């Protein structure tokens, strides 16, 4: 998510020091996750309540002062929603517009006609790979959902057969490839060249996507019981003509163009000395921010796909469409925020820091130490961006102290850290809840599918980048 979040977390963790021992905190974390899984899977308590209750109890047991308790809980909840709520909200509206206008059907028909029915999962995964390049996983996945839903309805297969390969593609792009915040932040902290990091990320990421994000996803999808398509985004309208393919393509590509523009402006300021107050830079940075890009796109979609086909005679249709889009995702947004709350509690207790400090002092090879530290932080607090950024910060002194490291080796270490940060997604990861709930999965099924793919992506990417690191050393 936001690259400023790790600094905020570190500041809060420094202010709130748990009086408990490291061993006690680690046991507390394990028990908290176990209790959470029991409440959700066995007791069948709603995930929102389960996460809030376990977060509160964990904070108390870990010794967070009662005067700071509410601030920690609401801070974790609010910081997660500050990014996720806007992305999911605008993404859900855009998805519903594309679905109800018949645009998803147009795209689905085009994909199936070009690739064939048997290769429809591959077509969706490739499309997600491209779409996920500049856009965060949360927003990109929500926008792609209507197309995934429509292909599943048309071909009659389980939703998992089409959704999991797309999710695997988004995972790889979000985890490893700049301009996503985790690898970008880690590159800056470790002193790696972002362009070279991008090249290394793609070298290891593309085979990782195909094996762990696509092929493994198909295996898991076929082993999962049939999953029908949910009605979260509604059904196509029958009282207006289908939109043209070019219009739908414009609506889907516009966020990419805007976000690419913002990224280019940031790069120009950082690497080429362009003034921050340059008028073009200011405009590109504004409209290239992901929430703003999705806002602009969703408004344009309303005009092109709702207002224009009805010649302006929409009545309450615009209001109803947005209400219908937001209502089903409110629960998802709350659960995602509660997942962020649980992650924040685990962070400020010092659990992740204790694990990372121990690993950092173990004398492991730099690339292996970076990967393991990132995995430990990921398991402890949930956020891939926080895990990668914090792991890079802990590793930075050792990297700086080794003048023999080449630019390519630094890029490999950065990608290794990013790979560790995406592994072992579980119940304290907001993305775990977002994807699971949009697909209509229960918690156990999400663990058997999404978590397995995330871990496979991380492990395979690390294995490949370690081989590359060894070759160039």
Image (spheres, rainbow, N blue to C red):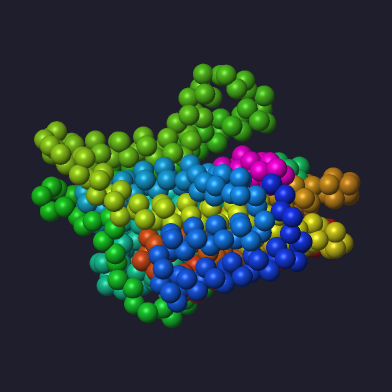
Q: Is residue 5 magenta?
A: yes
Q: Nearer the viewer, residue 428 or 137?
A: 428
- Residue 115: x percent and y percent? 36, 64
Taking the spot 55% from the left edge, 58% from the top edge, the residue there is: 55
Instruction: Give the extent of the magenta segment.
Output: 1-15
Q: Is residue 80 found left or right of 413 in the rendered image?
A: left
Q: Nearer the viewer, residue 110 or 226?
A: 226
- Residue 207: x percent and y percent? 59, 64
Relative vertical location of residue 385 with respect to residue 188 in this rendering, above or below: below
Predominant SS of the magenta segment: helix
Q: Nearer the viewer, residue 183 or 354?
A: 354
Q: Is residue 108 found left or right of 434 in the rendered image?
A: left
For residue 295, what is the image quadrant? top left
Taking the spot 64% from the left edge, 41% from the top edge, the residue there is: 8
Count the numbered circles shown.
Answer: 0
Residue 448 at least partly seen? yes
Residue 471 at least partly seen? no
- Residue 174: x percent and y percent? 55, 53
Q: Is residue 374 found left or right of 163 in the rendered image?
A: right
Q: Is residue 462 magenta?
A: no
- Residue 394: x percent and y percent? 77, 50
Taking the spot 61% from the left edge, 39% from the top edge, the residue there is: 4
């Amino acid at each position: 998510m936001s690259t400023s979040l790790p600094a905020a977390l570190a500041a809060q963790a420094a202010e709130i020091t748990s009086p408990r021992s490291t061993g006690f905190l680690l046991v507390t974390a394990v028990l908290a996750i176990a209790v959470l899984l029991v409440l959700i899977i066995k007791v069948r308590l709603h995930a929102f309540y389960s996460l809030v209750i376990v977060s509160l109890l964990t904070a108390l047991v870990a010794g967070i002062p009662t005067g700071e308790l509410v601030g920690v809980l609401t801070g974790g909840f609010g910081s997660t929603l500050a990014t996720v709520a806007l992305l999911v909200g605008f993404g859900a509206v855009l998805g519903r517009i594309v679905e109800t206008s018949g645009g998803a059907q147009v795209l689905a028909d085009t994909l199936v006609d070009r690739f064939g029915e048997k290769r429809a999962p591959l077509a969706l995964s490739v499309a997600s790979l491209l779409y996920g390049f500049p856009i965060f996983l949360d927003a990109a996945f929500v926008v792609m959902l209507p197309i995934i839903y429509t292909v599943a309805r048309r071909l009659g297969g389980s939703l998992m057969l089409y959704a999991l390969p797309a999710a695997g593609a988004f995972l790889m792009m979000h985890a490893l490839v700049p301009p996503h915040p985790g690898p970008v932040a880690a590159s800056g902290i470790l002193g790696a060249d972002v362009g070279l990091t991008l090249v290394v990320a793609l070298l290891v990421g593309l085979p990782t996507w195909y094996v762990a994000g696509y092929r493994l996803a198909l295996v898991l999808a076929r082993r999962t019981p049939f999953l029908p398509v949910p009605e979260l985004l509604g059904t196509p309208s029958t009282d207006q003509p289908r939109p043209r393919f070019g219009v739908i393509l414009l609506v889907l590509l516009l966020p990419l163009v805007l976000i690419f523009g913002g990224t280019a402006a940031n790069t120009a300021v950082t690497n080429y000395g362009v003034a921050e107050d340059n008028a073009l830079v200011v405009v590109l940075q504004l409209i290239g921010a992901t929430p703003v890009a999705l806002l602009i796109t969703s408004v344009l979609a309303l005009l092109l796909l709702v207002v224009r086909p009805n010649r302006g005679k929409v009545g309450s249709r615009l209001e109803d469409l947005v209400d219908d889009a937001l209502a089903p995702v409110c629960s998802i947004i709350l659960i995602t925020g509660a997942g962020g709350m649980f992650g924040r509690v685990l962070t400020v207790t010092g659990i992740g820091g204790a694990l990372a400090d121990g690993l950092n002092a173990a004398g492991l090879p730099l690339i292996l130490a970076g990967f393991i530290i990132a995995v430990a932080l990921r398991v402890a607090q949930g956020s891939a961006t926080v895990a990668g950024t914090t792991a890079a910060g802990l590793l930075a002194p050792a990297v700086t102290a080794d003048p023999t490291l080449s630019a390519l080796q630094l890029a490999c270490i950065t990608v290794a850290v990013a790979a560790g940060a995406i592994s072992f997604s579980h119940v304290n990861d907001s993305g775990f809840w977002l994807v699971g709930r949009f697909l209509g999965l229960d918690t156990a099924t999400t663990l058997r599918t999404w978590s397995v793919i995330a871990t496979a992506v991380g492990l395979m990417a690390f294995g490949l980048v370690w081989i590359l690191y060894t070759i160039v050393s």
